[in-house]
Amino acid sequence: MKNSSYSSILKSSIQNLRFLTSTTTPKPQYIITPLHESHIQAAVICSKIHGLQIRVRSGGHDYEGLSYTSDTPFVIIDMFNLRQVSIDVKDETGWVQGGATVGEVYYHIAEKSSMLGFPAGICPTMGVGGHFSGGGIGSLMRKYGISADNIEDAYLIDVNGTLLNRESMGKDLFWAIRGGGGASFGVIFSWKIKLVHVPSTVTIFTVSKTLEQGATDVLSNWQLVADKLDPRLFIRAVIQVQTVDGTTANNKTIQVLFQSLFLGTNSELLPLMKMSFPQLGVVAKDCTETSWIKSAMYLNNFPVDSPTTALLNRSLQSKNFFKGKSDFVRKPIKDFQLEKIWKLLLQEDQTPVLIWEPLGGRMSEISESATPFPHRFGNLYNIQYYMWWQEEGLSAAVKHVGSVQRFYKYMRPYVSSSPRGAYVNYKDLDLGQNEGLSTSYSKARVWGEMYFKNNFARLAMVKGKVDPGNFFSNKQSIPPLLV
């Protein structure tokens, strides 16, 4: 803590302002900023000797701050210096160090080829260390699956400080880190990714519908077709409360933004939309042809004239206080049920943004057990509940977190069950809270099966083999199951 750069480095990657307060958030005793894998190896070995926990931070987007907080003495290994991205166009692969961001990966791919891409998330400042190891859903998943489905190799430093690759770590550990969360098993130094083909021209559009413009009917039809559309077509629905005239809080409506990426030209897209989803009413003027890299920026709301180098800005995203939750939906929510949801949203003083992202396509073709990410066949779409606010203080946090918790509870009848599904990259410490936060296997099963379904038991067995002493642990790390 005596180093003059300690405070600035600590704060630099904390994306959620809930964990930036000086009084309530525990601080690490040391921050290690490795330049080489040997520095990570030394940090692991020394931390074990001195009884310190390790937190590994790649981009700082952990929704519950678990990559940079702990209730016991700890150190942070901040990977931001290890962010090299090497692209091999001929082999259609790349090596990505664990501290790189999604934006940096996208930029370096596009720098080498306009015909190659990679399936990953929409936010460019996410670190790949957590994003890839938790699955990595995004706008290309209907065509190519998630990030974890396109990982060919990895280098991981285990509990003994040993550097392992795919061959030396074995198939079980390599399986576990592709969707089961890397922080439970070691420190992931780098990933080998398999690049995917994208056309030189893609088409994007955003169409807005309010309740008065038939949003309920359009969203009902979206639920029926979004997962069944041509796999090249990704249309997500962003649902939010909108003040109609901008002057009175009582004059509100529901707005649904249908945001789309199509891997093809406008002339290919329009007949497809007319045939498969005419209710949205997409016409030529709604659509823009662009490159894949520009589409990635568009979906993250970059200004249209932004240079692609903006993707290299790790601190580009504005920071807020926020709380996230997630669900998976297996049956369409009926119109009258949607209307009840709208009523609840409109009567609340503060409401989350709901992001519904379609699955299907390649996602339905991959087995639930192929990677730890299990939310495949039979799921229509996933939901992210994103509640953000800007007021400081405990009372504001309690108010906003309470609001999204109530809404999440209300949604129970409309989403997956036994278990209710959740996405591990939208980390949520509320899950299993009634059972007490513990890393014991029996208690961890509650949240573990929500994230991983039947894969949780296999993850715990892998953990028992590679880290039986549970050195790499946090409030929602995989507990070791010793057999």
Image (tube, grey):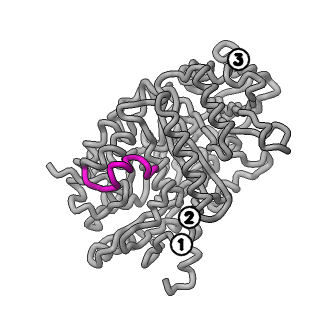
Disc 3 secondary structure class: helix
Which range is magenta? 428-441
The reply to whether discs 2 and 1 touch (Cβ–Cβ < 8 Å) is: yes
Q: Nearer the viewer, residue 342 or 358?
A: 342
The disc, 3 or 2, on the residue closer to the chain's N-terminal end is 2
- Residue 453 is marked as none
- Residue 10 is marked as 1
Q: What x and y, as percent, mark residue 399? A: 59, 53
Which residue is found at the position 24% from the left and 59% from the top?
467
Disc 2 secondary structure class: loop
Tell me the CA gap for discs 1 and 3.
49 Å
Tell me the CA gap for discs 3 and 2.
42 Å
- Magenta stretch contains residue 436: yes
Three-letter code for the amino acid on which mark 3 is drawn: Gln
Q: What x and y, as percent, mark residue 155? A: 37, 57
- Residue under numbered circle 3: 279
Which residue is found at the position 80% from the left and 48% from the top?
305
- Residue 14 is marked as 2
Is the stretch drawn in magenta largely helix, strand or loop?
loop
- Magenta stretch contains residue 426: no
Which residue is found at the position 63% from the left and 46% from the top?
110
Q: Is residue 134 toward the left or the right of residue 20 in the image?
A: left
Q: Is residue 189 toward the left or the right of residue 443 in the image?
A: right
Three-letter code for the amino acid on which mark 1 is drawn: Leu
Residue 397 picture quarter: bottom right
Three-letter code for the amino acid on which mark 2 is drawn: Ile
